[in-house]
Structure formats: C-alpha cells, structure tokens
Image (spheres, rainbow, N blue to C red):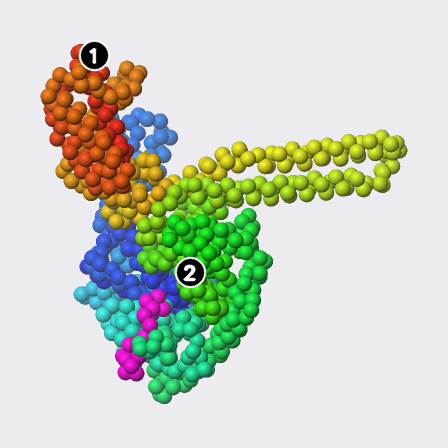
Amino acid sequence: MADLLIELFSEEIPARMQARAGEDLKKRMTDGLVEAGLTYAGAHALTTPRRLTLAIEGLLDHSPTVREERKGPKVGAPDKAIEGFLRGAGLSRDQLEERDTPKGAVYFAIIEKPGRPAAEIIAEVLEDTIRNFPWPKSMRWGAGSLRWVRPLHSILCVLTREDGNEVVPLDIDGITSGDTTCGHRFMAPARVSVTGFEDYAAKLKRAFVLLDPKEREAAIWQDATNQAFASGLEVVDDKGLLAEVAGLVEWPVVLMGSIDAEFLDLPPEVLQTSMKEHQKFFSVKNPKTGRIEKFITVANRETADNGATILAGNQKVLSARLADAKFFWENDLRIAKSEVGMEGWLESLSNVTFHNKLGTQAARIDRIAALAREIAPVVGADADLAEQAAKVAKADLSSEMVYEFPELQGLMGRYYAQAAGLPQEVAKACQLHYSPLGPSDEVPTEPVSVAVALADKIDTLTGFWAIDEKPTGSKDPYALRRAALGVIRLVLSNNVRFTLSSTLFSLIRSTETNQRRLKCSSKERDLEAAIEVLRKREELPLAFPNKEVLVDEAASSVEFAKTKVKEAKAHLEDTPSIKEVSSCKSNHLLSFFHDRLKVFLRDQGIRHDVIDACIAMEGNDDLTLLVKRARALEAFMSSEDGENLLQGFKRANNILSQAEEKDGVEYSYGADKKFIEDAAEAALFDALAAGEGAISSAIEAEDFAAAMGGMAALRAPVDAFFEAVQVNSDNQVVRRNRLNLLSQIRKVCGQVADLSRIEG
C-alpha cells in the first residue's frame, strides 16, 4: 500500500472556483485510478488561492492482473472471421483454444493483462486530468497548448511507502513533476521538498500557508469576533463573504478599521453592501444601535507595522467608495422628499423595457397595481393602500443607489417611501413585495405587502406564460419556478382563499389580447404603408406606355390591400380564438402551480399520490383548501383504518370497473334495499347512506378531519361485506344491485379525494 500526494501550483485561482476545482480533481483522479484497477482507502482535496492539493491514502502498489476469456467463431469458420477475432484479442491462431459446446466446436481466446505499477497509472491519469480539467474559464500562456485557469507553475506528485518515497515522473508542456512546493508568496517564497502529506502540511504551515480552507475560515472568524468583542461591537454574520475571503488568502491576518464619521449616518445596508461588494470587508456593528461603525479586512501577510499601512490604504479607498454612496443617498433623498416624490422616478421607467413582448416597466407597474387592488380584499388589505404601494414599489429601480447596488432594490424603496411621507404599510410593501425569494426566505404577513407580493409574482407568471416563455428542463431564466413557489408560500402562510384559475385566465387573456392587437397594428401599418406607396406612385416604367391601364391596376392593388387589412384585423381580433388559447395556457399554468406545490408538500412529508388524489378534485385552484384536504388525507392514510379502507375501495373499484367494461353499462344508480340478501350487505347499505350525508356536510364545512372520520366508519362494514358476500351472484338482479352498492362506495369515498390515484 502507498499514499499519494498531488499538488498543482499556479497563479491565484479565483475564490469562487476553488471548492469546485478541488472536488473535480478528487473525482477525476479517483475515478481514473479505480477504472485502471487501483483501489484506495480514502481521499481528500484541499485548496488555497495558489494550489490544488489531493491526498489519497491506502493506494495499491500495482493494478491486479486481469484474465479475460472471449468466445470466438466456430471452428471451421471463414478465415476472415477468425482473423478479425484474433486482431481484436491481440493473439495468434496457435494461442486459441478449441472447446466443444452444444453448438459445436468453438474457438476461445484467453487474454491476460498483467498488472502495472501504480506510478505508471498515476502519471497517465494525472496528465489526462490536467489536460482536460473542467475549469469554467481557462487560459493559455507561452508557446504551449496547455490550458489552465491561471498559468501553472509546478506539479508535485509523490508516492509514499514504508520503504521510501517516489516521485511519479510526468512532463506536461515542459512542466515536470517533482517533490517540492513553495510557501507563502511574500513571507516564505523558497521551495521546500516534502516526503508525504503530513510533512507537506506541516512545512506549508511553517511557510505561512494554511492549507485547509475551513481552517482559514475558522481563524478569520475567531480573530474578527475577538477584535470586535474587545471594542464592544459584533461582526455582521456573512458566511458567503467568509468563504470568499478565505479563498483570497493563504495566511489570513485580520485587521479592524474605522469608518469616517461623515458616513456613519448612511443606512447600515448601504454601508454593508458597499464594503462587501467593492472591498470584501466585513461590517462591524454596534449591537445597541444597529449602526455599522467599523469594518474588518483580511490581509494576506504579516507586516512589521502590524498592518497599519495596509489598514490606512484600505480606509482611504473605502472613504472614496462611501463618498459615492453618500452622494447617491443624498441625491435620492432630495428627489423622494420633493413635491414630485417617487412618482418622478416612475416616468423614467416608461423608457425601460421589462420584456420586448410584455412592454415597459411602467406598463407592468400599472398591471400590478390593478391586480393588487383586486387581491387586496381577499387578503384583508386596504385596496387604496395596496394600489398605492404597487405603484411606487418599483420606483427605486430608477434611483442612483439601486443603479449602483441592484441588490438593494426594495430595501431602498422602503427608505425613500418613508422619506416621502408615504404610509408605513406602503413603505414596508416596497421592501417586502419581492419576498419570499427562496424556500428559506421569510414570508410577508402584512396584508398590503402580501397583496403587492402576490400581484407582482402572478403578473410575472401569467405574462411569461402568455408569450410562451416557460421553464424547460433545468433552464428557468426568468425564475418562474421561484415565483410560483413564492405565490404558494404567500397563500399558505397567510391562509389566503381565492380561486386562482379565474385570475390566471383573466390576466393571460388580457396579455394575449394585447399581443394580438400589437400584431394586428403591425400588419395594418405594413399594409397601409404599401397602400401609400401605390397611391403616390407617379413615375411609370418605360415598359408600360399605356398609363391608363397601369393606373387601373394600381387602384385595383389598393383595394386588394385594403381588403387584406380588414381580413388581418378580423383574424387577429377573433375573440373565441383568444379565449380558447388563454384557457389552455391558464390550465397549463395551474398545472405548473400544482407541480411546485407537490415539491413543496413532499418536503413536508406528504406523499405525492396523496397530493395527486386531492388535485383531482374540484376546487384544486384554491391552494389553501387543497393543502388542507391533502394534510387530512395524509393523516388518514397513515392510520390502520385508512390503509384497510383503501384496500376495500380499490377492490370495489376494480370489480366495478371490470363489470362496467364487460357489460357496457354504468352502475351508478344506487342499490335498492329490497334486493339485499345478506346482513353484511344491509349493514353496508345503511353505513353508506349515513356516511354520504355526514361526509358531504363535513366537506361543505371544510372540516376534513370529520370527513376522514366518516370514511373511517365505513372501514368495518366494507371489510365485512367482502368477507361475507360474493358480488358476482348467479342472480343477475342481485348482482346488479351489489354492483350499484359498490358504486355507492366509490361515490361516497370519492367525495373526499380520488382514492384510485393512491398507491397501495
């Protein structure tokens, strides 16, 4: 057994690529080694800004000898067939074996592939890995053909055994493998030789390189929180920034600096975003006031002045950045507080295209405002406030601050709405109408915010559905899956009750009608332009000396063009066609909502077949009602009564379906008690009569727990019926009556859900 150490040393690798690159190196190397017959006990990859490292433990010294047996052509087969078999096997005819088989004598080839040394296999796999590494972006340098994310300087590849070490020989475009590496670029640039992973990690640490990115993250966070705590402050948690900064340094040195007093009154989110996006600084806040007062930067080296020069330079650059942010903030506030207010920004949005088929941002805002007003009563919001909030919710898109920091959209809208003196509900809606942005994002609960958030997402979905821009496979450029999940979470979290299908149809029909009108207008303009050309045509070609004839032809062409304009308008404004298309698209969009709902509920432990059984019922466009039904059915199906009743239902449904298919009639008229012969049959008849009314009343009251209780009461009489009664009696009258009784089982149980869709 041996241990393998690989290091690919290069110029700085972008932080966002490091983790994936480490996993790719591990997967490609281990897969290649195993495929070649070299198994291993364990492997782990580590990364720094300048190196990808892979350590593999318990690797075989040699690949095993492989003996393969191949069956060939029959003895006496044509020579060409035998020669082709020999070429494929790499043998001569005298090396073949003849064996008797039930189909006669056949040639067999015994191919033995001897094992190979580990070093030989490693060299092949590593070269292939390096030459075909899946970097998102790569480059070439010098005269070689090798591509790497940044120029590759050296390759360390060492096999370690109990009896010594071995450098795996490898040469890629003049870069030869060895057993040396470099330490920190500035603090320990000399090359050092290593014998194995433990020696390698220890020497790198002495050379000011922390190899493990998790260790660098922990060191940064511990030093940062300690320094902040010593000043009575705390670091704003940002795991994404922490991982990114850990990918920028090999020897993290944490420094804390101050923010100039003139910038401390900026909104904390502005300070945090500016420092994070431009400088990769952590924000340090006062826990008592929530104000950002200091920053944390991470240097890549220790200095004689303990980072004073580095910190001074960073503070100078930060002040310039924050001066820009302050200018944007003050300028935006001046506009928001003016007489025009945020409405001034809305005018500029009429020149911003949302989508070339869906119009401008201003047109979209008008649609959202109208829809928010319509939704407001459903969610308990004031219609005027909802409409007002929807009109200004996206006004901050024209502000200078959001132009510079798009990630602050919505949040800055809240600040500007407050500065403009708008109601607090409107200001909150400006920030919260984008939520929820993901499965773990907080869901708004304020009625006005809920109304605007629903209107925003539903308008997005219906608009793109109307123009046939739907998600396909893994592609979802307009984040429509996220928008649908957002609608679902808003509806369920706030117990919103409304029929989704009518809203979807209405909006899609409106968009479809506008699209038709645009097409009609375009066609009409083209044809009218052609008419004008014909009307104004005065110059006649020399080939037509008879002017009167040509004028008649021109007049005829004008009338023909006019007729075509009318036909085009009549076709494009065909209302029934629009209605049919809109209905199809809205049904498809509702199915899309159901698919997203299935994913959402499956994560909460509700089976997909239970959800399907509830979706098959009427009212499936009321998502709150649908989920209430599904949760009750899931609980019932998890009980013993539910499992047994399901079996009885399926048995009744199968017998009934087969009889209806065989007889060519539908048994749905209800059983007649006078034809009942058995006590169990009579008991089931009475139970179904009682259960139908009880279940129907419970469903009407949306008391699904009571409805499931009514279903549970049917379990015993259904079981007793099938134990005591033969449905297909020789007496046809009795048989038909019993089939009608089975139909009652299907009808009564079908009030709750389509149980035929449930597995089991």
Label 1 sits on a secondary structure element that is: helix
Which residue occupies the foreground of this view, 479 or 490? 490
Disc 1 residue type (three-letter): Gln
Q: Which residues are magenta?
A: 225-243
The disc at residue 429 is 2
Image coordinates of residue 331 in percent, x first then y, are 53, 73
Q: Nearer the viewer, mark 2 or mark 1?
A: 2
The disc at residue 732 is 1
Which image quadrant is residue 59 in? bottom left
| Relative vertical location of residue 587 with respect to residue 21 in this rendering, above or below | above
- Quadrant into which the C terminus falls: top left
Q: Residues within 10 Å of mark 1 (few under 14, many from 20)?
A: few
Which image quadrant is residue 689 in? top left
Which residue corresponds to the image point at 27% horizontal and 44% vertical from the top-left? Answer: 628
The single residue placed furthest to the top in the displayed view is 731
Q: Is residue 289 magenta?
A: no
Q: Is residue 242 magenta?
A: yes
Which residue corresponds to the image point at 31% horizontal and 77% vertical from the top-left? Answer: 288
| Relative vertical location of residue 265 with respect to residue 387 in this rendering, above or below | below
